[in-house]
Each structure stands twice: as C-alpha cells, then as structure tokens.
Image (tube, rainbow, N blue to C red):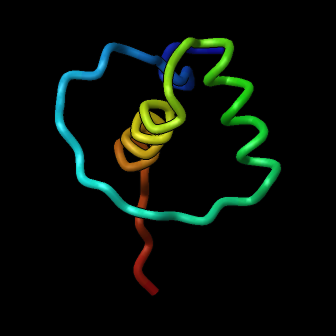
C-alpha cells in the first residue's frame, strides 16, 4: 500500500465542537475495534477519518 492511501494517525492538537450522528452498526463495530487496537477514542478516529475524506474528496456538481 502506498503512503498516499494510508490512514495515518497523529496526536490531537485542536479543540472541537459537539454534534450527534447516526452510524451503521457494522461501522460502529469497526470503529470500536480500531479504538481498542490504537488506544484512541472513537471521537479522535472519526475526526481523523473525516479529515482524510475531505482532503481526498473530489466533488462533482451535476
């Protein structure tokens, strides 16, 4: 796997806002497993995943 496709986890250094979301049970299970393996909170991992998604997003306007 090339470095550009890796999900790289680094220390948290900013404050955040609170929001509520709904996710599929399967995604929650994967998130819980990764949180346990990485010793990071679900919140930290979700923020990292969203940042990765936005940094690699291509929006196509119909």
In the rendered image of this protein, does residue 43 appear above or below residue 41? below
| 43 horizontally vs 38: left or right | left
Residue 54 screen position, x and y as percent: 37, 49
Q: Quadrant of residue 56 in the image?
A: top left
Question: Can you say whether 32 is above or below 9 in the image?
Answer: below
Q: Is residue 47 above or below residue 19?
A: above
Q: Residue at x 24, y 53 (%)?
A: 17
From the top left corner, tell me how far across and down residue 48 is, in percent: 42, 33
Q: Residue at x 47, y 18 (%)?
A: 8
Most foreground residue, 38 or 59: 38
Toward the left, the furthest residue is 14
The image quadrant of residue 13 is top left
Residue drawn where x is 43% and y is 57% of the image? 58
11 displayed left or right of 20: left
Compared across the picture, whether 35 is left or right of 53 comes to right
State the residue in front, 59 or 25: 25
Q: Position of residue 35 (x, y in %)?
A: 61, 24
The quadrant in which the N terminus is found is: top right
Name the outermost residue toward the right. 26
Instruction: Report the label total.
Output: 0
The residue drawn where x is 40% and y is 40% is 47
């Amino acid at each position: 796997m090339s470095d550009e496709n890796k999900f790289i986890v680094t220390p948290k250094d900013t404050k955040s806002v609170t929001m509520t979301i709904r996710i599929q049970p399967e995604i929650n299970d994967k998130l819980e497993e990764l949180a346990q393996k990485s010793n990071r909170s679900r919140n930290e991992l979700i923020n990292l995943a969203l940042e990765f998604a936005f940094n690699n997003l291509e929006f196509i306007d119909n």
